[in-house]
Amino acid sequence: MITTRHLSAIILAIAAACGGSPPPYQERTLPSGQTVKILGVGKMFFTKGDSALMLKYQTDLSLDDEAALRREVLAISEVFRQDVERAGLKAGIVNANERPVGHLFWSSNRSFNFVFEQAADGTWHEAERKA
């Protein structure tokens, strides 16, 4: 038999498990003063082609606002490409993630990749998107 006291304890335990955790990102400040929420950085390996360094970040922008998102990603890529070069790589991926939408037992979000490549002359450009 579950008493009111037991029910209160169960509800409190569920509430504690569902919220109150620290954000899953680290904040970094760009030279412009803009703060970026970094979710992680890691090396990506592909079956064909060279490896790339990927930076995943959380944006406050909608992925539907392509112009604003592109400006934000370009500002991030200017700094991130230094990390790519230090890793000895010629490609970097900036993965923009919208804020997760919480549901009762799961969350979901949308993300989009921007790929940057270093040319033979050392300049960087965004890779052409494939249809």
Image (cartoon, rainbow, N blue to C red):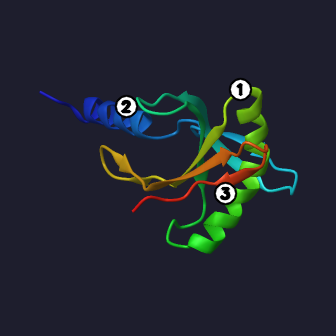
| Quadrant (top left/top right/bottom left/bottom right) for the C terminus | bottom left
Q: Earlier in the sequence, mark 2 or mark 3?
A: 2
Badge 1 or badge 3: first in the primary sequence: 3
Instruction: Decide: is 96 above or below 1.
Output: below
Q: Residue furthest left?
A: 1
What residue type is disc 1 on? Ala
- Compared with 106, 48 (above or below) is above
The residue to which callout 1 is attached is 87
- Left or right, 60 with respect to 27, comes to left
- How packed mark 3 is, by other alpha carbons closer than 10 Å (few <14, some 14-19, many 20 or more), is some
- The residue positioned farthest toward the front in the image shown: 120
Quarter holding residue 105: top left
In this orientation, which residue lies closer to the viewer: 18 or 86? 86
Residue drawn at x 17%, y 30% as measured from the top left: 2
**Mark 1 secondary-structure assignment:** loop
Which amino acid, mark 3? Val
Determine the residue positioned at 71% across, 58% down.
Answer: 74
Front-most of residues 47 and 5: 47
**Front-most of residues 86 and 131:** 131
N-terminal of the two: label 2 or label 1?
A: 2
Q: Determine which residue is flagged by label 2.
A: 13
- Label 1: how many residues lie within 10 Å, few (<14), some (14-19) or many (20+)? few
Which element type, helix, strand or loop, lies under badge 2? helix
Mark 1 and mark 3: Cα distance apart in space: 20 Å
Q: Which mark is residue 73?
A: 3
Q: Nearer the viewer, residue 109 or 3?
A: 109
Total marks placed: 3
Residue 87 percent across, percent down from the top left? 71, 26
